[in-house]
Image (cartoon, helix red, strand yellow):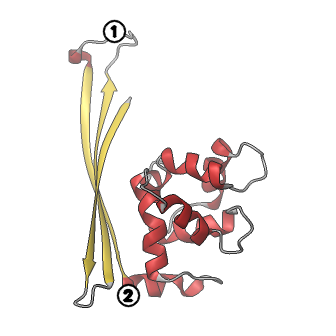
Amino acid sequence: MDLEYTVTETMYRNHSGQIIKIEFQFDESTTMALGSTSSSMSRQNQEKYYRSYQWSITRDQYELRINRLQKPITFDAFVNSLRPIIMGYYKNNELKRAFAILDSDQSGAINIKEFSDILMILNNSVDVNVLAEYIKQVDENFDGELNYEEFQALILRGIGRDIICNHF
């Protein structure tokens, strides 16, 4: 199975430049083999599927969702941490900034609680046990937390896209 996708990010701002809504559009195509296990498959033995997902959140919706969190972050901090998670790549210091925001206790690692808080805002059906399995895939020191390098590996694997598109 081959998965290809594009992600489009759109930010909406009010008259003073403040972000009031962020939106992501995912366009995904999956190529599946049909009945043949040969590695030299012809195009006739493949089928392509297309799906689109859209996810958005407004500043007001965010404020309603964070009321259950012990240490909520601002909407602007959420947006800053969100971009590399959703896009699966980053520019300049975006990932370091996201890591610093998510490491709310400044321990040098993101624990499952800190990470699940932001991911539950993306998809409230995210199960902490599923998230723990994702973390295990990159947890090189087996401490159950994400240091910066492990967080980077998780982001580059597309965890945000998987969570929003329900690819668990």
Q: Nearer the viewer, residue 30 or 99?
A: 99
User: Mark 1 is on which residue type?
Assistant: Ser
Specify whether 22 is left or right of 167. Answer: left
Instruction: Count the marks.
Output: 2
The quadrant where residue 116 appears: bottom right
Determine the residue positioned at 47% across, 74% down.
Answer: 78
Badge 2 element: helix
Q: Residues within 10 Å of mark 1 (few under 14, many from 20)?
A: few
Residue on which disc 1 sits: 40
Number of the label disc, if any, that sits on residue 55? none
Q: Nearer the viewer, residue 130 or 84?
A: 84
Q: Quadrant of the N terminus?
A: top left
Asked where in the image residue 49 lies, by quadrant, the reply is top left
Report the front residue among 20 and 63. 20
User: Tag 1's secondary structure?
Assistant: loop
Among numbered discs 1 and 2, the one appearing first in the sequence: 1
- 32 left or right, relative to 135: left
Please give the residue where the numbered disc 2 appears in the rendered image. Answer: 60
Residue 98 vs 12, above or below: the answer is: above
Q: Residues within 10 Å of mark 2 (few under 14, many from 20)?
A: few
Q: Is residue 164 visible?
A: no
Identified at 70% across, 61% down, the residue is 109
Residue 30 percent across, percent down from the top left: 31, 36
Residue 39: which quarter of the image?
A: top left
Disc 1 from disc 2: Cα separation: 52 Å
Where does the image place residue 58, in percent across and percent down from the top left? 34, 80
